[in-house]
Image: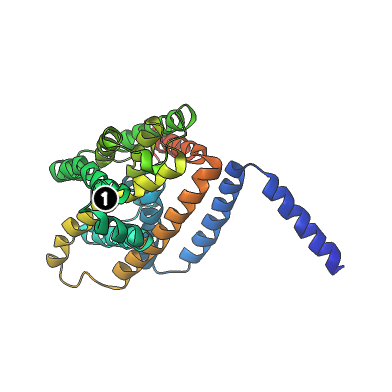
Amino acid sequence: MANQSTSTLLSRSARFAALPAFVRGAVSAALVVAVVVAFLALLPLDYRIAISLGIVQGLGEFLPISSSAHLILVPWFMGWPDPGLTFDVALHVGTLIAVVAYFWRDWVRLIAAAPRPRTPDGKLFWLLIAGSIPGAIFGLLLDNMAEQALRSRLLIASTLSLMGLALLVADRWSARDRGLADVGVVDTLAIGLAQALAIIPGVSRSGATIAAARLRGVDRVAAARFSFMLGTPIIVGAALFKLRHLAETPGAIDGPFIAGIATAAVVGALSIAFMLRYVQRAGLGLFVVYRLLLAGLVVVTLVLGLR
């Protein structure tokens, strides 16, 4: 009997493994979501919000689905109160921890090579710094507008859809033979300008930079890796810029604040690892479909007046 059960499990596992990576990813994601929802239902509301938004930030910052859009849409869908700027600090600190923890060895090597810009690592260091400049400028100039004027749900649905289609085009119809060592100044300028567009909710920093890199002929894994490393200075800057709000809010560091940081950090690191492996096997199709479905859900919700 035990042999028969083992044989059945192995057979089901083999059938699951034979499914396209796109389908396996969707099924696995649905199972994870079900488990997380069941766990969150047991928590007090403030911790439920903190952990949920930590998950959203950790996923959205590194998967091409837009963290800013999700941090607007999830509380809207759920009817949650605005967690405020202080909690926004916690989420950015969490993703800062994630990206530094994942890439610290790379950054130590690149910083050590910075005085030698003609070496591959030295060249990459200065390209990453130069590519971060457009995003930093746009962020400083347009941060307040993004926090207020660009939060329209209809705008977010539009940017989710348009960026999803851009990802599809970039991934399917671009060359695929250039690695990280082949990225040059023109590539970096194009990717850096794309990163600057991520100030608009729904665009996605990782989505815009990966799409730009793919359009420049960079292969999927190199595009994702360059995107995450290019985002490191921006994430560091955003976290430091937002930390000023802590001084304005005494007693802000509480249990939910810590829970948000920890959740965003852990989920963010797992998202980076997942993305680097997944795009090598399956491309960006799963994220395109998700973006279009979410945009459709937003539009239906608005049309029916459900929110």
Camera-nearest residue between 24 and 77: 24
Residue 35 location (% of width, % of height): 54, 61
Residue 223, compared with residue 99, is above or below; it is: above
Q: Quadrant of residue 48?
A: bottom left
Residue 306, compared with residue 6, is above or below; it is: above
Which three-letter amino acid code belongs to the residue tagged 1?
A: Gly
Camera-nearest residue between 5 and 44: 5
- Residue 49 in view, yes or no: no
Camera-nearest residue between 284 and 177: 177
Residue sitting at x 58%, y 42%: 22
For label 1, the residue is: 122
Residue 281 location (% of width, % of height): 55, 44
For residue 21, side relative to residue 50 (left or right): right
Q: Quadrant of residue 292?
A: top left
Q: Quadrant of residue 100?
A: bottom left
Name the secondary structure under disc 1.
helix
Camera-nearest residue between 279 and 88: 279
Residue sitting at x 74%, y 53%: 12
For residue 95, side relative to residue 130 (left or right): right
The C terminus - image quarter: top left
- Residue 166 in view, yes or no: yes
The N terminus - image quarter: bottom right
Residue 166 location (% of width, % of height): 40, 30
